[in-house]
Amino acid sequence: MAKWYVLQVSAGQETAVRDALHIMGIRAAVPQEERLLRKNGGWTSRIYTLFPGYVFLSLEYSAENYYRVKAVPHVLRFLGFSGLSPSCLTHLEAEWLRLLSNGGEPLKPSRIEELPDGSVRIMEGVLQNFPVRSIHFDRRARRAKVGITLCGEPKILTLS
């Protein structure tokens, strides 16, 4: 059964590695989002990689697959707890990855509404999938920081 693993790759080469893995028949994901940026008094959008320097891939781990993946240009290493053998993502982490990958399309910015009591209601977008997580909103920058666990370590993910 195929499990999800994490590759560390050269910075800026995430999509090239993902495409090379797809050509080899290996399912790979690089979660991206359409991030809103304030520029010259207006808002523009730009595509950002959510986990720079990392590619997620689903495969049955074997020595043959390990060397096939390591032969791809810009692949540095598999991530693992001990550093000796790669560790797979847990079921919950794989679900977070599925939500953030959005079927290979960049995530659209979430739409929120500020309520009179100062709280925030999420109207649409990926942030609706984080109801039990701590979410910190930066209204000025139009960003939300969400705590998730990835590879057994807590991470702060910034979403637009």
Image (cartoon, rainbow, N blue to C red):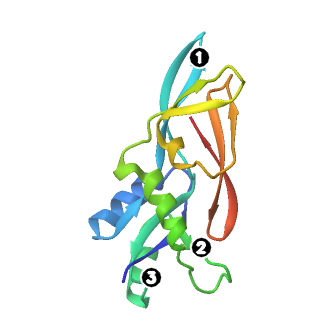
List the single residue furthest toward the bottom.
63
Q: Can residue 144 be seen in this view?
A: yes
> SS class of the residue under badge 1?
strand
Give the mark nearest the N terminus, 2 or 1. Answer: 1
Q: Nearer the viewer, residue 27 or 120?
A: 120
Give the residue type at disc 2: Leu
Given the image, on which type of amino acid does mark 3 rest? Tyr
Determine which quarter of the picture holds residue 135.
Answer: top right
Q: Which residue is drawn at 39% across and 59% down?
A: 18
Q: What residue type is labelled 1?
A: Lys
Position of residue 146 relative to residue 90, above or below, is above
Residue mark closest to the camera, 1 vs 3: 1
Mark 2 → mark 1, Cα distance in angstroms: 37 Å
Q: Position of residue 153 (x, y in %)?
A: 69, 66
* Disc sitting over residue 66 in the figure: 3
Secondary structure found at label 3 = helix
Between 119 and 140, the one lying in front of the other is 119
Q: What element carries label 2?
A: loop
Is any atom of residue 110 visible in this view? no
Is residue 103 found left or right of 91 in the rendered image?
left
Query: Which residue sits at x=60%, y=19%?
Result: 38
Which residue is drawn at the image coordinates 70% and 61% (left, top)? 154
Residue 13 percent across, percent down from the top left: 48, 53
| Sequence order check, earlier mark of 3 and 2 | 3
Q: Of the numbered discs in the image, which one, if any, rests on residue 39?
A: 1
Q: How packed is label 1: few (under 14 Cα within 10 Å), some, or many (20 or more)? A: few
The quadrant the C terminus occupies is top right
Q: Name the residue under label 2.
A: 79
146 lies above or below 28? above
User: Crowdedness of circle 2 by 10 Å Cα count: few (<14), some, many (20+)?
Assistant: some
